[in-house]
Image (cartoon, rainbow, N blue to C red):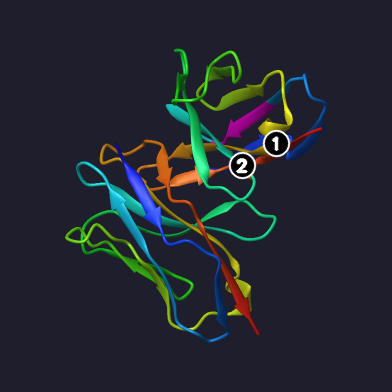
Amino acid sequence: GNSVTQMEGPVTLSEEAFLTINCTYTATGYPSLFWYVQYPGEGLQLLLKATKADDKGSNKGFEATYRKETTSFHLEKGSVQVSDSAVYFCALSGSAGRRALTFGSGTRLQVQP
Amino acid sequence: SAVISQKPSRDICQRGTSLTIQCQVDSQVTMMFWYRQQPGQSLTLIATANQGSEATYESGFVIDKFPISRPNLTFSTLTVSNMSPEDSSIYLCSVSGTAEAFFGQGTRLTVV
């Protein structure tokens, strides 16, 4: 079955530091890959996505590249802000589309001023 | 895109009682999904609700505990039955578009 493995948190960084949150997956076929973010007290929001190999998703300074050869979708940001403090979830959906997502365990990011 | 409205947004319930959560989507969708997010944990799929047929439950979840209704293509309910403190979680409704999933704001349930 499908699975997603995320680096454990919490990750604590100073403002303007470089961020990497690792995500690897196991899936059959060609899944779509996502990063969702959950700010304190709020619901899940889609941060970025990639639907095929070598695609790069980007949003709000965050980027992730769909690497089929390494089955990875690592999240990066060059300079984090305090407002980026949240829980980040890596997820995938089956290649057939319109299916439920499989989520990683989530990584809490804390950015200190 | 899809806009999902979930009610209630939060509730505090007595153990042994049941709570029904409603999910309304602003467009017709074939499948709706119910997830549970236990405190500090990731999201776990409870079941897939298909209009006109029985819901499909994931391992570890049963219909007697989490009955689901799907009367039409825009609405679904999830009931958490005979609640215990271990059911304290956020419950989320979701639908999938062609390239992404959309989530309701969730129902934060506390069982005391």
The residue at which mark 2 appears reads as B38
* Number of residues whose C-alpha sits closer than 10 Å to that of mark 2, classed few (under 14), some (14–19) or many (20 or more): some
Residue positioned 45% across, 82% down in the render: A18
Secondary structure at badge 1 equals loop
B65 on left or right of B60: right
Could you tell me the amino acid type at mark 1? Ser
Residue A21 image point, x, y percent: 42, 68
Secondary structure at badge 2 equals loop
> Can you see residue B28?
no
Residue positioned 29% across, 36% down in the render: A1
The chain under label 1 reads B
Judged from this view, the residue extending furthest toward the left is: A69
Could you tell me the amino acid type at mark 2? Gln
Q: Which residues are magenta?
A: B21-26
Tag 2 near tag 1, CB within 8 Å: yes
- The tally of labels here is 2
Q: Earlier in the sequence, mark 2 or mark 1?
A: 2
B25 part of magenta stretch: yes
Residue positioned 34% across, 45% down in the render: A3
In the picture, the quarter occupied by the C terminus of chain B is top right
Q: Nearer the viewer, residue A42 or B62?
A: B62
A12 is higher (above) or lower (below) than B40: below
Magenta segment's dominant SS is strand
> Can you see residue A67?
yes
Label of residue B88 in the image:
1
Residue A25 image point, x, y percent: 30, 52
The chain under label 2 reads B
Examine the image and state in which quarter residue B11 appears: top right
Between the residue at mark 2 and the residue at mark 1, the CA separation in whole angstroms equals: 7 Å
Residue B5 image point, x, y percent: 64, 38
